[in-house]
């Protein structure tokens, strides 16, 4: 029987073929350019119809987050629209850590990814549709190292400056699915959540902070191998023009509320991380963050507060991270939203795990929670 064919030479593609035998393959994830980070994969298998595929991704004990593999199930799609999950297991003893994916596609082609990809073309469609909506202004804040625009959408007639930004870490594609959900709400003139928020706030929305890393199939860095979420204290045009452009725009607008949207490899839950430990910490600012967290926890079944990152001790905050820098720089209620690559264990979905559809629904819950937070 002929060997399957495996390709990854496309937008956000990432895999290296070690060997193929029939319907089985041994694979390896390529590192981010000029970096040791690797975890994101995205590839296509051809010649799969009627065959039980066995795909082994090896050398994962040295990946960026080895704790992300136990309990993880790979994302699969045959139409690149609906993404399900495949039977997946992890053995840390096999070939320095091996993820084994088993799946029998119905058709000849099947795509596999670490999470449902969010393509550059879909990003451009998202920007175009939002920019064409009534009351929405488009701004190009600057350009990436590869020359891609840092797209920003602005809307709302209110006085409170709100910043929503995502995909500093490009492999965390769930963040842009969240952004799509947020923009669908905010750009709908009939949506009551949008009507309230647009009357009280001026939104500045950057759906993809790292377009180069997204297209290159990186997990965590830009075209120069730089982790953008460690550049916020001293961004430079040479290493992190993406952060420099966004932070300069924030300096002009001010920031009162900010959400930086991410994904977490290991924790099977949605949670928030705050700015505890910044030099300018105050009890009042902390109370604002705690109140938003409590509102979201009450409103959304897809959110929880039991799992998350430990609070940073007083005076120990890393100001090169955006949430800390924005809170310190502007006195803003700033936060990082983390969503899982795995599933949300409190409300699991055996077919899809955590999915693009649920990312978009969580965005609406976050915006509805902001309405209530503003009333407080």
Image (cartoon, grey):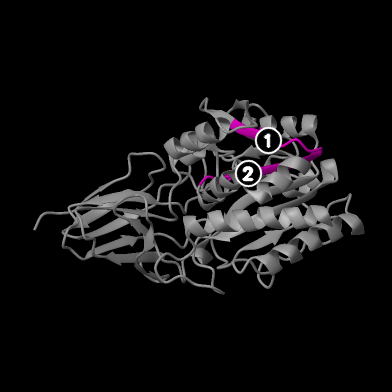
Upstream in the sequence, badge 1 or badge 2?
Answer: 1
Instruction: In this rendered view, identify the residue nearer to me: 27 or 11.
Output: 11
Q: Position of residue 243 (x, y in %)?
A: 66, 35
At 72% across and 34% down in the image, what residue appears?
Answer: 247
Q: Position of residue 209 (x, y in %)?
A: 59, 38
* Magenta residues, start to end: 151-170
Answer with left or right where residue 115 lies relative to residue 305.
left
Q: Position of residue 315 (x, y in %)?
A: 86, 55
Residue occupying the far left of the picture: 1
Q: Which residue is mark 1?
A: 155
SS state under label 1: strand
Residue 46 visible within the image: yes
Q: CA distance from mark 1 to mark 2?
A: 8 Å
What is the crowding at mark 2: few (fewer than 14 residues within 10 Å), some, or many (at least 20)?
Answer: many
At 29% across and 54% down in the image, what residue appears?
Answer: 78
- State which quarter of the image contains the C terminus: bottom right
At 81% across and 44% down in the image, what residue appears?
Answer: 256
Q: Which residue is mark 2?
A: 186
Residue 208 sits inside the magenta stretch: no
Residue 144 visible within the image: no
Q: Are marks 1 and 2 in contact (CB under 8 Å)?
A: yes
Question: What's the magenta bit mostly, secondary-structure-wise?
Answer: strand
Answer with left or right where residue 82 lies relative to residue 355.
left
Answer with left or right where residue 50 lies relative to residue 164.
left
Q: Position of residue 151 (x, y in %)?
A: 58, 31
> Which corner quadrant of the image does residue 239 belong to?
top right
SS state under label 2: helix
């Amino acid at each position: 029987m002929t060997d399957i064919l495996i390709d990854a030479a496309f937008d956000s593609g990432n895999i290296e073929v070690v060997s193929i035998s029939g319907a089985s393959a041994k694979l390896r994830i390529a590192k981010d350019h000029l970096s040791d980070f690797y975890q994101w994969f995205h590839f296509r298998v051809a010649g799969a119809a009627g065959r039980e595929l066995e795909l082994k991704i090896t050398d994962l004990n040295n990946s960026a987050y080895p704790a992300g593999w136990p309990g993880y199930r790979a994302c699969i799609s045959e139409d690149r629209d609906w993404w399900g999950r495949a039977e997946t297991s992890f053995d840390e003893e096999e070939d320095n850590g091996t993820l084994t994916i088993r799946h029998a596609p119905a058709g000849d082609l099947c795509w596999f990814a670490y999470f449902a990809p969010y393509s550059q073309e879909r990003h451009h469609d998202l920007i175009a549709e939002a920019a064409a909506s009534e009351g929405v202004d488009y701004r190009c804040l600057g350009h990436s190292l590869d020359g891609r625009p840092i797209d920003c959408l602005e809307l709302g007639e209110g006085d409170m400056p709100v910043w929503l930004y995502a995909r500093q870490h490009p492999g965390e594609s769930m963040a842009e699915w969240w952004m799509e959900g947020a923009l669908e709400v905010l750009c709908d003139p009939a949506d009551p959540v949008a009507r309230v928020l647009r009357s009280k706030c001026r939104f500045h929305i950057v759906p993809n902070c790292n377009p180069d890393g997204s297209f290159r199939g990186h997990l965590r860095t830009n075209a120069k191998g730089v982790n953008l979420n460690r550049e916020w204290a001293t961004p430079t045009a040479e290493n992190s023009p993406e952060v420099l452009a966004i932070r300069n725009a924030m300096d002009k607008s001010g920031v009162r509320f900010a959400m930086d949207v991410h994904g977490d490899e290991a924790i099977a839950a949605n949670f928030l991380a705050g700015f505890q430990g910044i030099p300018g910490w105050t009890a009042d600012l902390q109370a604002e963050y705690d109140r938003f967290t409590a509102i979201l926890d009450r409103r959304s079944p897809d959110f929880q507060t039991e799992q998350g990152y430990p609070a940073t001790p007083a005076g120990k905050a890393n100001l090169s991270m955006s949430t800390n820098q924005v809170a310190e720089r502007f006195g803003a209620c700033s936060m990082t939203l983390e969503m899982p690559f795995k599933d949300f264990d409190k409300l699991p979905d055996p077919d899809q795990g955590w999915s693009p559809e649920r990312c978009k629904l969580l965005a609406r819950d976050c915006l509805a929670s902001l309405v209530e937070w503003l009333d407080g």
